[in-house]
Image: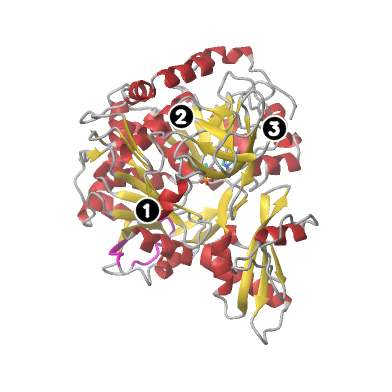
Amino acid sequence: MSGNIYYPDSSYKETAKIHNYSDKYQEFTKDPDAFWRRIASDLLWFEPWDQVRVWDHPFARWFTNAKLNITYNCLERHLNNDRRNKVAICWVGENNRERILTYYQLHKDVMRFANGLKSLGVTKGDRVCIYMPAIPEMVVAMLACARIGAVHTVVFAGYGAKALNERITGSQSKVVITADSTVRRGGSIPLKPIVEEAIINAPMVEKVVVLRTQEPKVGLLDDLEIDFEDLMSSVPRQCPPEPVGSEDPLFILYTSGTTGAPKGIVHAAGGYMVGAYYTTKYVLTLQENDLYWCTADPGWITGHTYGTYGPLLVGGTIFMTEYTPDYPDPGVWWRLIEEYGVSIFYTAPTAIRMFMKVGSEIPDKSDLSSLRILGSVGEPLNPEAFEWFYHNIGKDHCPILDTWWQTETGMHMITTMVGEPMKPGFAGKPIPGIVADVVNDEGDPVPSGTTGFLAIKEPWPSMMQMVHQNEERYRGYWNFGKYHYYSTNDLAVKDDDGYIMLLGRSDDIIIVAGHNVGTAEIESALVSHQSVAEAAAIGKPDDLKGNLIKAFVILRNGVIPTPKLIHDLKYHVRMMLGPISVPAELEFVETLPKTRSGKIMRRVLKAREMGMDPGDVSTLEE
Ligand code: 6R9
C-alpha cells in the first residue's frame, strides 16, 4: 500500500498551527466533553446546556436543554462583529449575471421571508419543502425556515415529480418553496410543472411559494400559489430569532435507502450547528479573507453543511454559481477562480476526473494563484485524480482535503488535516473528535492492509438524530457486530500510519458522479412501467462518473423488446426520479439471479457484467 506522500508546503505552517492534529486529538481523548464544550462556547446560545453529551445507545443527546437559533449565529453574530458590510454571498449566473449579498442584506431578506412564512401559518416544528436552483433565494429560504424554527427539507432541483412527491409526503411539508425554472447550460428547465405534478397526491401542502425569474411572469394558481417577492414585501421587516431547543430538528434531508423508500435524515439544531462550525473552521480552515467556493448544490448535505451553514457560521464569504463545469466550455470554472480570486475550492472527484480528461492546458490558461486550499468529497478521490488536482490546480503547494463523511454524519469525519502529510488515495485519519476504525463483521479491528467496514465508535455532535418516522431504520445504523458502533456501510482499509482508504459502499447504493442512487428506487421506477415485469440495477465502474447505472429488465409476456422501448424506459425513469437516476445502459433479459429467499443478487450480475468471478453463490436459486 505504499505510494507517494506529499508534505505540506512551509507556507501552511501558520494555518496548521490553528489546529495541530496530534495535540488536538490528544486534547479530545483526554476529555471529550471539554473538547466539544470549548468549541460550542464560540457560538451564541440563548440558554446554556446542562450536559454536553448524554449517550444512551443508540440515542445521543447533545447540549441538552440549551436554547439557540442557528441563524442568530449565522447573521447577528457577524452584524455585531464588524462584518455588517462583508459579502456573505457572491453569486454568478450564466452570461456573467452577478449578485452580491452582504451580511446586512442577507439578514434583512431572511427576516422578511421568515415573516412571509409566518403569514402563511408556518410555525415552529412545521416542515417546509424547498425545491429550488442554487441561487441566493435558496439560502434565504433555508435560513428563513430556521429563523422561525420550521424544519426545511431541501430537494435537489434535478429530482423528478415522483421523487419530489415522496419527499413532500414523507416529511409532511405544509409549504413548498420553488422557482418557475432553473437555468442550466444555456437553457431553462421549468420547475413549477414538476411541483404541480408532485403535489397531486400530497394533501398536506397548503401553499406553494414561487420565485418568478422569467419575463413574462408565469401565471399563478389562485389560493394555492404565491409570489416569492410579494410574500416578502407585504410583511413586517423585523423577525427576531425563535429560540429552539438544542434537540429540536433543524432539517430533514432525504438520502437513498438500500431498500424501499428514501430515508429522511433528521439533524438536530444544537449538535449540527457545533459540528458544522467546528469543521468549517478547523478542517476547511475558512478564514476572514477567504473567498470560498463549494461546488455542491444546496440540495445535498455538502451544500447544507459546507455550502450554507458552515461558512455562514464562521462569517465567511460564499461564492456560488450557476455555471456547470463544462458549459460554455471546460475552462469556465478556472476563469471564475481567477476573476473572483477564489481561495478555497471544494469540489467532487467526478468533476476533477472530467477536467483531467479534457487536459491541463485548459486550467493553465487561468491564473489560479489565489487558491490556498483544495477539497474533495462524495466518492473516493483516486490517486491519479489526486495527483492531477495537486499538480495542475494546486501547483504543488495547496493542501488537498479528501473529506469522507455522509448525510448521516452531518460533518467531516475522516480527512488529512491541513499541515499533515498527504497520501494520494487515502482520505486520511479520523479528525479530532471522531473515533473510527476499520473492523470485521463482528466489529473487531482488522489488521492494517486488510479490507473491512468503516465503523464510528463514539457519537459526535452533528450525527443524525433520527431517521424521520422510522426509529427501526435509525437503530439499524447503531449496531455493529457485538458493539454499539455506527455502521457507515462503507468498505475501507487502513495503513500502518492509521490512514484510511475508502473502497466504496458495501450495500446497494450506487454513487454516480458523486450522487447516491438506491438500486431499489431505480428498480421500482422501471417496474412501474406497463411493459416491465422485473428489473435489477447495478453500478458499473466508469472512469469519469465513478459508476454508471446498468439496468437489467425482464419484460412482461408479449412485450417486444425494441430500441424505442429502451428509450421509453429511460424517459420514464427520468420523469419519475430525475436525470441522475437514469440507467446509462439497459439490457433486456429472460431471468435474474436470485437468492432462495427471492432477493436479486446484484453482486452476481455485476461480476458477470465485468467478467469476474461472482464469489460465493451458495444462496443462488437453481
Ligand atoms: C458527503 C456525502 C455518502 C457516501 C459515503 C461514501 C461516499 C463521500 C467520500 C466518499 C470516499 C470520500 N463518500 N465522501 N467515499 N471518499 N472522500 O457525500 O454524503 O451523499 O450521504 O454520501 O459517499 O460511500 O458513504 P452522502
**Image-based side of 603 in relation to 290, left or right:** right
Decide: marks 2, 3 in contact (CB < 8 A)?
Answer: no
Residue drawn at x 60%, y 29% as measured from the top left: 428
| Residue 586 place in picture, x, y as percent | 69, 67
Secondary structure under the numbered disc 2 in the rendered image: helix
| Residue 215 place in picture, x, y as percent | 43, 59
Q: Name the residue under label 2.
A: 279
Secondary structure under the numbered disc 1 in the rendered image: helix
Q: Mark 3 points at which residue?
A: 449
Residue drawn at x 19%, y 46% as measured from the top left: 236
Disc with the residue nearer the chain's start (2 vs 3): 2
Q: Name the residue under label 1.
A: 471
- Per the rendered image, the range of residues in magenta is 204-220
Task: Point out the image quarter for the N terminus.
Answer: top right
Q: Specify whether residue 561 is in view.
A: yes
Disc with the residue nearer the chain's start (2 vs 1): 2
Mark 1 residue type:
Glu
**Mark 2 and mark 1: Cα distance apart in space:** 28 Å
User: Taking 251 as reference, is 605 above or below it?
Assistant: below
Q: Main secondary structure of the magenta part?
A: loop
**Image-based side of 528 in relation to 36, left or right:** right
Q: Residue 377 is drawn in which quadrant?
A: top right
